[in-house]
Image (cartoon, rainbow, N blue to C red):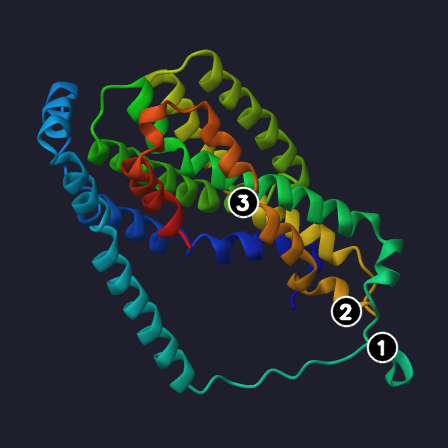
Amino acid sequence: MGVPDTSERRLNLAQAFNPPGTITGVLVGTYFIFSGVELAPGKVVQMKAAGTYAGYLHSEIMRVVPTYVGLGSGVLLLALVIGLIKFPSVAMGSSVPNGEGVGSFRELREYPHLWLAVAAQFFYVGAQVTTWSAFIPYMKQYTNVTEREAGWFLTGNLILLLIGRFASTWLMQWIRPVKMVAVYAIINSSLMTLALLHPGFVGAMAVMTSSFFMSIMFPTIFCPGCKRARAEHKIGQRPDCYVGGWRSCASPVPRSDCSLEREHRTGLFRRRRSVSIGLRI
């Protein structure tokens, strides 16, 4: 739909309106899941000796329940509203001669750019999910911020993502989107290297800055992979081709947890991860 030459710009502009919902989700988690109560090591020892520490962990973890019930109810209400709205019908023309089918996945082997795009999406979405999921534990482990302060910084990641999409969409008038993605990928690799070599507040800011340069990755990778398939193979122009890559993208997340301290494997760590993973879903 529309001119292929500007497809990346249009899709990036449409995706620019996604971050406000994600930002809202993280803010909800920061205020309603994080209690703001962080015990000193000495206090934890006293509570364990008194047998009250398990109850504390349980009460902290259970803060997730009403938040998710509220979010789930909101999503169901939105689905009901959408279901009741009558949308205009869109006539889908077909360029397939003689009424033949839309092609098969087997025929798409002729289009390596499509499969390369699927592979690129796999690695990109895995990197994005891992980066945002580990951001709060990273700040807790290597800086002195509180949980809620770390939640504010996570919100900063998403604000930079929003700014990056609008700014990059504007720049695509003069810079080829594929070239821009390549430059952004190099910058992000450098930022992640900085975060690994200099853990602390500087590293956390490098991770946060990477969200600006991640902003155009998803839609810009999507477009070239689709539009290089011939018109008669409409199956290559559907997002179904990317589902396998998306469903597998969460696999790097558990691996990233291995580098965290034992403390972060407790219920409190699972609660922290719920803000950055669950609310995004």
User: Tag 2: Cα neighbours inside 10 Å, few (<14), some, or many (≥20)?
Assistant: some
Pick the front one: 131 or 271: 271
Position of 233 with respect to 87 (left or right) is right
Pick the front one: 104 or 190: 104
Q: Mark 1 vs mark 3: give the one in front.
A: 3
User: Tag 1: Cα neighbours inside 10 Å, few (<14), some, or many (≥20)?
Assistant: some
Marks 1/3: CA–CA distance: 37 Å
Q: Which numbered marker is on residue 260?
A: none
Label 1 secondary element? loop
Residue at 36 percent across and 80 percent down: it is: 80
- The residue carrying mark 3 is 250
The residue type indicated by label 1 comes to Val
Q: Position of residue 110 (x, y in %)?
A: 89, 55
Q: Of callouts 2 and 1, which one flags the residue occurring earlier in the amino acid sequence?
A: 1
**Circles 3 and 2 in contact, beta carbons < 8 Å:** no
- The residue carrying mark 2 is 234
Q: Position of residue 195 (x, y in %)?
A: 45, 19
Q: Quadrant of the C terminus?
A: bottom left
Q: Which numbered marker is on residue 96?
A: 1
Task: Classify 159 as above or below 96.
Answer: above
The residue type indicated by label 2 comes to Lys
Residue at 56 percent across and 41 percent down: it is: 126
